[in-house]
Amino acid sequence: MTVDWIKEMTDLVGEEKLLLGDERLEKLSKDYYWYSPVLEPLLRDKRADGIVVPESEEQVAQVLAFAYRHQVPVTTRGAGTGNYGQAVPLEGGIVLDLSKLDQVLEVTEGHVRVQAGVRLGALEKMLREQGQELRIYPSTFMKATVGGFVCGGSGGIGSITWGNLWDGNVLEIVVLTLEETPRRLVVSGSDLLAYIHNYGTNGIVTELTVPVTTKTEWRQTVAQFDDFESAHRFAHAVALDDSIRKRLVSPIEWPIPSFFKPILKHLEPGNSVCLLETEEGTGEALAAHAAEAGGRIGYVISPDQYRRTIGLSDFTWNHTTLWALKTDPSLTYLQSGFHPVDFPGQIAKIKARFGDEVLMHLEFIRSGGTVVPAGLPVVRYQSHERLYEIIDFFLSIGVSINDPHTWKLEMGGRGQLEAMLAAKRSNDPRSLLNPGKLQAPAPEVARGDK
């Protein structure tokens, strides 16, 4: 980054909004890519030339116009809780930190409109005080932003009822393009498919409208089982039982629960578990399902302690992997999709082939209205080659993989790739938005423009 570049950007946004110190550049150029032993050595040395922290949509547009003029790459950052290097700048340039766009703009019965930097934890707290709550959110919700979740995530707590982001959980967004004069696009309906889980590769999302639902008093329950087969059989029955209102159904194979140090005293050693959030009053139904599967109800957190103590969701989704990594840094994980009916056979084949090299962790969700087990298994990492042998075996038995060990959307992401590519060609003619994450060939006019 040249002195002239620094000076012009400083004049544009002010010294307090342009961060240049080595420590800040290092910290704000990173996310949680170190979950992956494949990504960690590839991304550890990547960092921005400068961090810009705008405080308004107008300032975002000014920065994007500047980047277009100077052909400077721009990588968007929310809270940096993504796991695939979404917020890591592969080619330097600007990291655009949207954390100061943190205004709740509108709250109605049924939806909220917020700026991209609003933290999900703060939004959930505000909504619950008003008798509503978020439909879905990631396990990192206390830090994660709404924009970061929509552009870098997929589903989470609540997905057992409400599905993933693509299942009507985003209503409208505002997108800024990276052009000589950035356009402000208001996107809704099927056009949203180009921007959900896009890593900021084809536009900068500054504002979002998402649906919310009526507040529920949530009971948190640990169900205990002698083996994982019983645990996932129970979880499936609960997931399919529409009489039980639920936010979380997460069966986890032992010894993964032994990594959950804050609640370990409440767990039965050697037993697999299913972690649940269900509506108050569903205890008897859960107990009946547990007995049917040969298990029993263990630790229970009453609704009056919800959010007042560490919650069971803090041990689910990718927080499960985090607790595993805290115990053994050689562990890693996969993201997989199992058959909605035949998953027990798929799991049996995986366990027969790999044993404790692959430890099972499922999250039951609704995807397109169908209850399916999404797998986040913990893997004992040996080598890159062995990891992809495991992935190939999963694929060979019909288990889909969203590879968490790549930053490329084509290989590890979700969403409508062709729609994303079309939006990138239209909105980012110089291919400056988070380059390297979406492999879009630049149109002829853009190549000449460069």
Image (spheres, grey):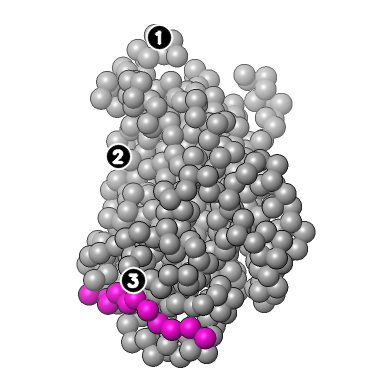
Q: Residues within 10 Å of mark 3 (few under 14, many from 20)?
A: few
Q: Which residue is mark 2?
A: 100
Report the number of discs. 3
Q: Which residue is mark 1?
A: 4
Q: Quadrant of the N terminus?
A: top left
Q: Which SS class for mark 2?
A: loop
Q: Quadrant of the C terminus?
A: top right
Q: Residues within 10 Å of mark 2 (few under 14, many from 20)?
A: some
- Which is nearer the eye, 116 or 19? 19
User: Disc 3 or disc 2, which is closer to the eye?
Assistant: 3
| Kind of residue at disc 3 | His
Question: Looking at the image, which residue is at 70% across and 42% down?
Answer: 385
Q: Is residue 128 visible?
A: yes
- For marks 3 and 2, give the CA distance: 40 Å
- Which is nearer the eye, 204 or 162? 162
Q: Residue 251 location, x and y as percent?
A: 50, 70
Question: Looking at the image, which residue is at 38% across and 86% down?
Answer: 282
| Left or right for 7, reference 272 | left
Q: Is residue 13 visible?
A: no
Q: Which SS class for mark 3?
A: helix
Question: Looking at the image, which residue is at 22% across and 65% down?
Answer: 308
Q: Are marks 3 and 1 in contact (CB under 8 Å)?
A: no
Q: Residue 169 location, x and y as percent?
A: 47, 62
From this viewpoint, which residue is outermost toward the front?
Answer: 269
- Which sits earlier in the primary sequence, circle 3 or circle 2? 2
Which label number is shown at residue 85? none
As for residue 18 lying within the magenta part, the answer is no
Q: Which residues are magenta?
A: 294-304
Q: Which residue is mark 3?
A: 266
The relative height of residue 299 versus residue 56 in the rendered view (above or below) is below
| Left or right for 36, reference 14 | right
